[in-house]
Structure formats: C-alpha cells, structure tokens
Image (spheres, grey):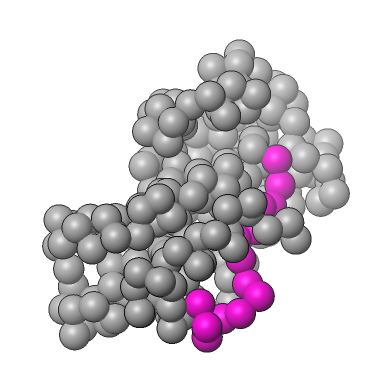
C-alpha cells in the first residue's frame, strides 16, 4: 500500500513535539494511512454503512453491486446507480432515505457537481463543503473521506468519539475534553493533525481502519 508522501516527515515532526504521539509511533511501526477504492465507490460505501453493522453493510453492498451490474473488482458506476429506481435500491436492503442519498450522490458525480479532478485545487474546508452538499454526507463522513481517500494531512475530526476517547485517556486522565480543549491541544500537531489522530486511534484499536 502506498504511503502518503508526507508520512515520514510527519512522524518525525510529531515525535519531536509530543511525547504521547512519539510513544504511539514507536508502538506501531511500519503502519500508515492507506487509500481504498475510487471516490464514488468510497462515498457510496460510507452511506451504505451508516448506523448498521459491518456485516449487514457488506451484504447490502454486494446486492447493490449486483443490481447495478457491477462486481467486487469494479468501481460502482454513478450513471448506472442514477438509472436505478428507488424500489430497486430498496430491494438491495437500503432504507428509503439511504436509497435517496445514494441517488443524490450519483447525481452529484454525473453532473460534475462533485468532480474529483477539481479537488486538488480546493482547500480542506472547501472540499468538505462540496461533499456535505450531498444528502446523507455530514461533516464527519466528509472528514473521514479527506483523511482516508484524499490523504489530506491536517484534518482534525473533533466530533469523532474515538479521537475524544483517546485524547481523554492520554492527555486528560480519562476526562472527556471539550471541543475547545481538543482543538487547542491539536494546535501542536499542525500541519499533521490527520497523522496524530490516526495514531491516537491506534491506541484504541491497533488494526488500522480503512474507509
């Protein structure tokens, strides 16, 4: 898996500034962020997986691929998704709302309202704003996408429960920090807040998560 180009510099910089992160980097050597899938497939999977188990999400995903004449090795085609009726998508196990969300996501891609070629020119907040314009994509999902697909180096998902829990454990003697306290702590991690967050997640679950 390709390592983000900033990763080595990030871990050197963070280790020199923060003893907690330094310890986590030492505890999990050789691991790094990895990208999986194309943009549309990644976002569609995120919508499918909202508020259900991983097993249920995988079952629905496989049915969706079949309904859209796709396969596990092929990216999901937004044009095919857009042509499918809501009833067809519901038949895959999607709720009415999620079926509408998936169709809306497909429309954003087919109309180029979401255009991956334009994303490198957008800063993090501009790209988040473009993503949350899609029904069913909130800020947290957009932040995960920036971290895990776009490999943005300086994303801080302050609303993430895992990050809050890890910061409480390592920095606040188990007390959950306020969002202001979390942001203030994370100022020391800039411009590599994604990397610091990723290592703090590792302290809760050593197996890297992919989105």
Is residue 28 on the magenta stretch?
yes
Image coordinates of residue 150 in percent, x first then y, are 58, 42
Image coordinates of residue 193 in percent, x first then y, are 39, 56
> On screen, 84 above or below 183?
above
Residue bounds of the magenta highlight: 25-38
Asked if residue 139 lies left or right of residue 62, the reply is: left
Is residue 209 on the magenta stretch?
no
Looking at the figure, which quarter contains the C terminus? bottom right
> On screen, 193 above or below 124?
below
- At 61% from the left and 33% from the top, the residue drawn is 87
Q: Tell which residue pokes out farthest to the top in this image.
A: 111
Image coordinates of residue 183 in percent, x first then y, are 23, 55
State the residue in front, 40 or 195.
Answer: 195
State the residue in front, 201 or 190.
Answer: 190
Asked if residue 69 lies left or right of residue 178, the reply is: right
Q: Main secondary structure of the magenta part?
A: loop
- At 17% from the left and 68% from the top, the residue drawn is 177
Task: Kindly tell me whether residue 107 is visible in this rendering.
Answer: no
State the residue in front, 109 or 147.
Answer: 147
- At 63% from the left and 72% from the top, the residue drawn is 31
Asked if residue 4 lies left or right of residue 62, the reply is: left
Looking at the figure, which quarter contains the N terminus? bottom right
Mark count: 0
Residue 160 image-quadrant placement: bottom left
Task: Kindly tell me whether residue 123 is visible in this rendering.
Answer: yes
- At 61% from the left and 79% from the top, the residue drawn is 29
Image coordinates of residue 17 in percent, x first then y, are 35, 69
């Amino acid at each position: 898996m390709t390592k983000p180009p900033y990763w080595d510099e990030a871990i050197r910089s963070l280790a020199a500034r923060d003893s907690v992160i330094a310890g986590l980097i030492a505890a999990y050597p050789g691991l790094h962020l990895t990208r999986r899938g194309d943009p549309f497939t990644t976002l569609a999977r995120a919508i499918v997986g909202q508020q259900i188990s991983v097993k249920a999400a995988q079952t629905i995903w496989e049915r969706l691929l079949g309904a859209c004449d796709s396969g596990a090795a092929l990216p999901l085609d937004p044009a095919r998704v857009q042509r499918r009726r809501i009833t067809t998508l519901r038949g895959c196990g999607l709720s009415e709302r999620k079926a509408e969300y998936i169709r809306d996501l497909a429309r954003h891609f087919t109309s180029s309202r979401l255009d991956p070629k334009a994303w490198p020119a957008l800063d993090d907040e501009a790209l988040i704003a473009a993503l949350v314009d899609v029904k069913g994509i909130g800020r947290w999902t957009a932040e995960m996408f920036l971290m895990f697909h776009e490999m943005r180096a300086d994303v801080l998902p302050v609303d993430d429960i895992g990050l809050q829990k890890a910061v409480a454990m390592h920095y606040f003697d188990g007390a959950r920090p306020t969002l202001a306290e979390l942001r203030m702590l994370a100022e020391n991690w800039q411009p590599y807040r994604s990397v610091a967050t990723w290592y703090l997640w590792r302290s809760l679950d050593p197996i890297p998560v992919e989105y």
